[in-house]
Image (cartoon, helix red, strand yellow):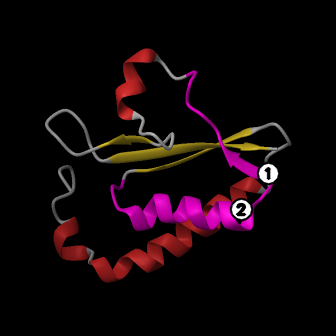
Amino acid sequence: IRRHPDIRWNRSPEDLPKYQAIQTSLLHEASLLLAPGGALVYATCSTEPEENEDVIALFLKDHNDYSLESPSDFPQATKELIDSRGFYRTLPSEWHDGFFAARFKKN
């Protein structure tokens, strides 16, 4: 919202299911292109669980050949932005936009 303040008037909470469906579909389509052992990164510029954790849960429910990959090899400077589930997240602030990322591995 910081970079696009008009979003307050163009979007509403009722839009979240529509965006979740689009993002789930995009993630599924991308997963079809990945070779076994490959990595897939899902990232959004959103802080909403419906567009992040919920999409991850839906994807993993339908794709048992994928697992969340630990971000242990991320640069040390980013470690404080990774939560206990392995999700990379920044919250809107003076220095950051809202951002979310998770990395999968195709087994």
Q: x, y percentage for residue 84?
A: 45, 40
Q: Is residue 94 left or right of residue 71?
A: left
Residue at image location 62% in from the left, 63% down from the top: 26
The residue located at (52%, 23%) in the rendering is 74
Residue placed furthest toward the bottom: 14
Q: Quadrant of residue 107?
A: top right
Residue at (37% x, 51% y) in the render: 45
In what quadrant of the picture does the N terminus appear? bottom left
Question: On the picture, is 22 further left or further right than 16?
Answer: right
Q: Residue at x 74, y 51 (%)?
A: 66
Which region is colored magenta?
A: 46-73
* Quadrant of the image occupied by residue 51: bottom left
The reply to whether dot 1 and dot 2 touch (C-beta < 8 Å) is yes
The residue at which mark 1 appears reads as 33
Residue 15 versus residue 91: which sits nearer the camera?
Answer: 91
In screen coordinates, is 26 left or right of 13?
Answer: right
Q: Which amino acid does label 2 sit on?
A: Glu
Magenta-span inclusion, residue 65: yes
Crowd tier of the residue under label 1, counting other residues whose Cα lies within 10 Å: few below 14, some 14–19, many 20 or above: few
Q: Which amino acid does label 1 sit on?
A: Leu
Q: Is residue 14 left or right of residue 101?
A: left
Picture coordinates of residue 94, whole percent (x, y): 13, 36
Which residue is identified by label 2?
29
Q: Is residue 67 located in the magenta-colored stretch of the structure?
A: yes
Mark 2 lies on a secondary structure that is helix
